[in-house]
Amino acid sequence: MNKSDLIKKKICVEFYKLITKQGYNQTSMRQLSEECKMSLGHIGFYFGKKEDIMISICKIQLAKAYNVINECQDIPDEKLLKLLIYLIFTFYMVDRRNIVYRLVSDMSSNNEFLKWRTCVICEYLQEAYREYGIYINCKELSNVCSFFMHGMYGYIHEEYTCGNTVDYKKGFMLFIKTLLVHFDSAQCNRYIEKSLQLFERLNKEKLVSQLELELG
């Protein structure tokens, strides 16, 4: 790892410590500067704003989660199933870890972050649909994914604000049909049931560990 990567890693680690301790919205770049013992200008050279750091962290966590899913021999090599299992995992983490619950709630009004998340989901879903010979207009698919992402984050934020617990299975089932709009109802239900069954057989402890940040 070169010097630049080491500095980025340090910034991400310190930022992650701050947001898990006090929340994303309560964390400032100035606080991060103090924790990193770097000037704001130095941090700004690598990350222009908080969203850039958060996205960098999420990219790493996303890749690690998919690695665990890909390694599971029980899961067929189908992009759609792997995407659905990752989305169940997102709800599962909200259900089981208050830190994640709060962070997702914090990000529910961050349009730049949600735009990035929408693009990621859209790309995965497009590839998944192509496996079934379904080609969808990019704009239409982007709108579907945006509706899904804003709805999911908004729902979690509302539940968090009200002090409610999110049932990960119900939360997943509540929103997932939005993404599978181009499947008929029976086919959609089959994929929902199959992905839930596969998730139950997954090594959840290993999946959970993906959110314990290790940037090495």
Image (cartoon, rainbow, N blue to C red):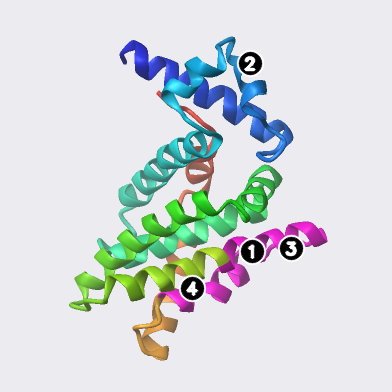
Answer yes or no: do the residues labelled 1 and 3 have beta carbons within 8 Å?
no
Decide whether residue 6 is among the magenta residues: no
**Which of 207/19 is in front?**
19
Residue 159: numbered disc: 3
Picture residue at 41% right of the left edge, 37% below the top: 60
Residue 201 seen anywhere in this rendered image of the structure: no
Query: Residue 152, how many percent across, how many down?
Result: 58, 65
Rendering coords of residue 33 (x, y %): 60, 17
124 and 107: which is toward the camera: 107
Marking on residue 176: 4
Nearer to us of marks 3 and 2 is: 2
Q: Which residues are magenta?
A: 151-179
Q: Residue at the location (40% across, 15% down)?
A: 6
Report the amino acid beneath label 2.
Answer: Glu
Query: Label 4 sits on what residue type?
Result: Ile
Distance CA(mark 1)–CA(mark 4)? 15 Å
- Distance of label 1 from label 2 (alpha carbons): 31 Å
Disc sitting over residue 181 in the figure: none
Is the magenta region chiefly helix, strand or loop?
A: helix
Label whose residue precedes the other's in the sequence (1 or 3): 1
Q: Quadrant of residue 9?
A: top left
Residue bearing mark 2: 35
Q: Nearer the viewer, mark 2 or mark 4?
A: 2
